[in-house]
Amino acid sequence: MITYTLICDKDHEFAESFDNYDDCMAQLKAKKLKCPTCGSKNLVKGLSAPNVSGQTAPDIPACPAMGGCANGACGLKA
């Protein structure tokens, strides 16, 4: 089983488990799922962090540089 974050057209996010990616996409296309908050069936798959070896992802601090690291102003560099 794999868990994906789903987002409705009213920006409500929730998690749902599927057998695999194709199962998720088939259920979304067939509109078999609905948002538990508002009941909307207009859903998309959100971004999902990979789960490696059952470990949770570490907390990653937000980048303080407005232009990103490419401008050389990254405050997160060691």
Image (spheres, rainbow, N blue to C red):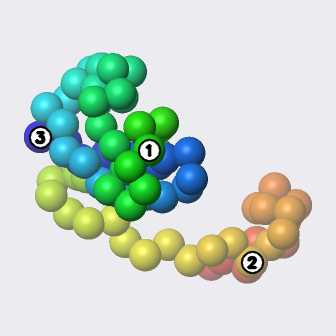
Q: Are marks 3 and 2 in contact (CB under 8 Å)?
A: no
- At 43% from the left and 75% from the top, the residue drawn is 59
Residue 45 in the image: above or below residue 7: above
Circle on res. 54: none
Q: CA distance from mark 1 to mark 2?
A: 36 Å
- At 41% from the left and 37% from the top, the residue drawn is 41
Q: Are marks 1 and 2 in contact (CB under 8 Å)?
A: no
Q: Earlier in the sequence, mark 1 or mark 2?
A: 1
Q: Is residue 35 visible?
A: yes
* Number of residues whose C-alpha sits closer than 10 Å to that of mark 1, classed few (under 14), some (14–19) or many (20 or more): some
Residue 75 x/y as whole percent: 73, 79
Q: Earlier in the sequence, mark 3 or mark 1?
A: 3
Q: CA distance from mark 3 to mark 1?
A: 24 Å
Residue 21 x/y as whole percent: 28, 28
Q: Nearer the viewer, residue 4 or 53?
A: 4
Q: Nearer the viewer, residue 50 or 25?
A: 25
Q: Earlier in the sequence, mark 3 or mark 2?
A: 3
Helix, strand or loop under label 3: loop
Residue 27 x/y as whole percent: 28, 26
Residue labelled with disc 3 = 1
Q: Tag 3: residue type? A: Met
Q: Is residue 39 left or right of residue 2?
A: right
Q: Quadrant of the N terminus?
A: top left
Helix, strand or loop under label 2: loop
Q: Nearer the viewer, residue 74 or 33?
A: 33
Residue labelled with disc 2 = 64
Q: Nearer the viewer, mark 1 or mark 2?
A: 1
**Rendering quarter of residue 18:** top left
Helix, strand or loop under label 1: loop
Q: Tag 1: residue type? A: Ser
